[in-house]
Every structure is written in C-alpha cells, then in structure tokens.
Amino acid sequence: MKPPYEITSKILKYITSISEKIGEVNANFLNKPSPQLRKQNRIKTIHSSLKIEGNTLTEEQITALIENKRIVGPQKDVNEVLNAIDVYQTLKDFDPKSEKSFLKAHNILMNNLIENSGKYRTQGVGIVKGSKVEHLAPPAQNVPYLMKDLFKYLENLEEIELIKSCVFHYEMEFIHPFLDGNGRMGRLWQTLILMDKYPVFEYLPFETLISKNQEKYYQALSESDKSGKSTKFIEYMLSIIDSSISELLNFNNRTFTENERLEYFISLNKSEFSRKDYMDVFKDISSATASRDLKNGVEKNLFGKIGEFNKTKYLIK
C-alpha cells in the first residue's frame, strides 16, 4: 500500500525547479564533479550527517581520518566517522531497493557502536524531548513487515523518484526500525534512492543544509507525524535538495585557479576537445586565459595537441 501524502503546489514547484537544475547540472558536466570537489563534498556529508546525531569531530579531523592519520577525539565519535567513511566510499555497492543491502549498510554504519548492528530492534522505542514523548514508534513485532512493505513501495514505477526518496526517508524514521542509527540511515538511503536515477546525488551533501537548521528537520518530521501524512516532510526535503543543487551550480560559477580548472576539466573524461569545448565549461574566462590554460596543460603533459589555429584539438593522455 502506498504511504499517505498529498501533492501540494509547493511540492510541484520544487519538483519543477529541481528537474530544471538537474538539466543544468548535466548540461554543465557537473554530474561528476572534480576529484577535489567530490572529496570535499564527501567530508561535508559525513560531518553534517553525524553532527546532527551529536558527533563532535570537525571537518579537518574527518579529513585526517580519510587520509589514515591519527587524531585526538572521543573514541565513539572516531568510530562513527570511520564507519561512515567505509559506507560512503562504497556507496555504489548498495542496492537502494534491497532490504538485505539496507541491513548490511546499517551493520557497517553502527559497527562497534551498538549491539546487534544490522538487525531490527526487538524492543519498543520512543523519542523523548525534555519530559515529553515526541514520537512513539510502532511495536517491535511490526517492524519486519512494515519495512518489507516500505521496500515494496520503492518498486512502484509510477512514483516520482524525488518524492519516493522523501517518503522512504520519512516512513523509515516513523517506523524507527533500529535501536540507534535511524537518522543517518534515513539520510543515507534517500541519497542512494536519488543516486539510482540522478548520479550527481552521490556528490551532493544535502545533509549540510539540514545540519545548519536541525530544528526545521525535526519540525517537518513532527508535523508529518501529527497529520499522519509525509506531505510536510516531502516539502521540507525537496526544499533542501533544491538549495543543495543551487549551491553546486553556484560552485561552478566561483573563481577557479588554473590548476583547478585543468583538474576539473580532465575529470570530465573528454577524450578529445577544442578550446571552445573548454570555454563552454568555464564560461567566465577569456579566450586568452583559455589558450594559456591549454598551453600550460600541454607543457605539464596532461594532454597532447594536434593541429594549428582554429583547427587545434587536444587529446587527454
């Protein structure tokens, strides 16, 4: 059965905006950002998703752990980051439509943090804020079949992927299938569902925007709980996704150094290109700057050059 929600004018507005921006992302070859930007975004994703759960490590400390350096910090926080690095470095190994894959991801994410990682809870849980029970999750005995139903919903081909990812995120949070790690699993699995259709989401750290104002995230979950529908949460998450893609597009308009331009362009895997192709990606540089970049790229042995004047072509080595 399809989880309940309504299509509102806000949802339609965000879907239109996101779809247009994804078209712009593809047209500007941003669906596979440069290695440097990919690394930065992965660090931001891990930092923000764990910060929401109370992790105290900084982006600099997470960078050090990715580079296999030792850091000083609470062991629990270090373990959380190391587990998240393991998961996010192997994102493509997980199948968003597979419950078995879902449990495997939780097992890695929560390894050495809780008992029975990778297994559904066998006791009742609730979310308490202050002295008030904010959310009472369904009984433990209902969790296995509720999650099976939720994974069946992911197979619904008539659903728009953007909406489907938000619905799964909300419904999983509502079911609260694990004793711990539900929040980070909800955000991880939404990323995987979106990646399946839009590869750019592998490198899009929408968690950063959530962590900047966590209260709105929890408020959207709470409002959906009270209404019995995921509508408010869908509106909230689509607004976050829309803003995240805008930030990615704005990144492309920032001032790159020559080395950053060359590194970025090479990462696009164009085997043969012209100066015009180079300038189509970096629209704000002059033809003289483009020529200088390409001349230096040849001197650095990043690519070869054939032809002269307006017939010049460059070949990636």
Image (cartoon, rainbow, N blue to C red):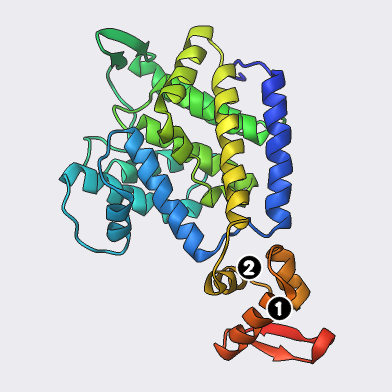
Kind of element beneath mark 1: helix
Front one among 153 and 129: 129
The residue positioned 41% from the left and 23% from the top of the image is: 215
Question: Residue 182 in the image: x percent, y percent?
Answer: 37, 30
**Mark earlier in primary sequence (1, 2):** 2
- Badge 1 amino acid: Ala
Name the residue furthest right: 310
Question: Could you give the CA–CA distance between mark 1 and mark 2, rounded to whole angstroms?
Answer: 22 Å
| Residue picked out by circle 1 | 288
Q: From the viewer's perspective, is 161 left or right of 170? A: right
Question: Residue 12 in the image: x percent, y percent?
Answer: 72, 26
Q: From the viewer's perspective, is 102 left or right of 243? A: left
Say above or below: 28 vs 23.
below
Say above or below: 89 vs 171.
below
Front one among 270 and 245: 245
The circle drawn on residue 173 is none
Front one among 41 and 139: 41
Quadrant in the picture for the C terminus: bottom right
The residue carrying pointer 1 sits among few (fewer than 14), some (14 to 19) or many (20 or more) residues within 10 Å by Cα, namely few
| Residue picked out by circle 2 | 268
Question: Residue 248 in the image: x percent, y percent?
Answer: 58, 49
Question: Residue 5 in the image: x percent, y percent?
Answer: 62, 16
Kind of element beneath mark 2: loop
Say above or below: 88 vs 193.
below
The residue positioned 39% from the left and 14% from the top of the image is: 138
Counting every numbered tag in the picture gives 2
- Badge 2 amino acid: Leu
